[in-house]
Image (spheres, grey):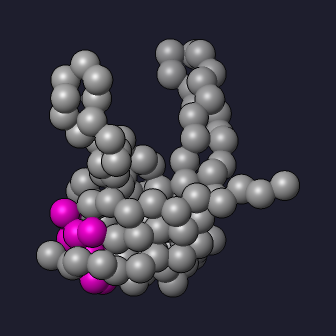
């Protein structure tokens, strides 16, 4: 089986570091990725907003060097998780980043 994803996009917000109870650091960010084709309806390029989770050293590096609007590449894997909203469970998918390449820092 293979679970591998590579994305290149802009950070939507200022990356922030969160320290968990056990001392592990994590950075949750959203990556804006422009689709490589135009919409048939609008004739415009559409953008997907992909949730990305970065852990430990990778998270620290991204928070140190990236700002809102920085272009980065992320190699990682998809992970499904459940969230609860109004007592209903929903499936959602996020990218667990395993490697980050800094392309254009702001």
Q: Look at the picture and state if 48 lies above or below 40.
A: below
Magenta segment includes 67: yes
Magenta segment includes 37: no
Coordinates of residue 38 in the picture (x, y in percent): 27, 36
Specify whether 56 is left or right of 59.
Answer: right
- Tell me where residue 16 sits by quadrant: bottom left
- Tell me where residue 5 sits by quadrant: bottom right
Quarter containing the N terminus: bottom right
Q: Is residue 21 visible?
A: no
Q: Residue at x 54, y 47 (%)?
A: 94
Q: Look at the picture and state if 3 lies above or below 22.
A: above
Q: Residue at x 59, y 72 (%)?
A: 98
Coordinates of residue 106 in the picture (x, y in percent): 15, 76
Q: Which residues are magenta?
A: 63-71
Q: Is residue 92 visible?
A: yes
Coordinates of residue 63 in the picture (x, y in percent): 33, 76
Q: Residue at x 63, y 51 (%)?
A: 78
- Tell me where residue 8 sits by quadrant: bottom left
Q: Tell which of 96 and 18 is nearer to you.
A: 96
Total marks shown come to 0
Q: Look at the picture and state if 61 lies above or below 33.
A: below
Q: Tell which of 73 and 41 is nearer to you.
A: 41
Q: Tell which of 36 and 20 is nearer to you.
A: 36
Q: Residue at x 53, y 76 (%)?
A: 99
Residue at the farthest right position = 1
Coordinates of residue 43 in the picture (x, y in percent): 19, 29
């Amino acid at each position: 089986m293979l679970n591998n994803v590579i994305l290149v996009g802009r950070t939507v917000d200022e990356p922030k570091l969160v320290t968990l109870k056990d001392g592990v650091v994590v950075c949750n960010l959203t990556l804006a990725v422009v689709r490589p084709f135009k919409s048939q309806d609008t004739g415009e390029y559409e953008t997907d907003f992909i949730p990305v989770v970065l852990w430990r050293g990778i998270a620290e590096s991204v928070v140190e060097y990236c700002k809102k609007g920085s272009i980065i590449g992320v190699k990682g894997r998809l992970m499904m998780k459940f969230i609860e909203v109004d007592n209903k469970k929903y499936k959602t998918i996020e990218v667990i980043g395993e490697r980050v390449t800094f392309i254009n820092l702001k």
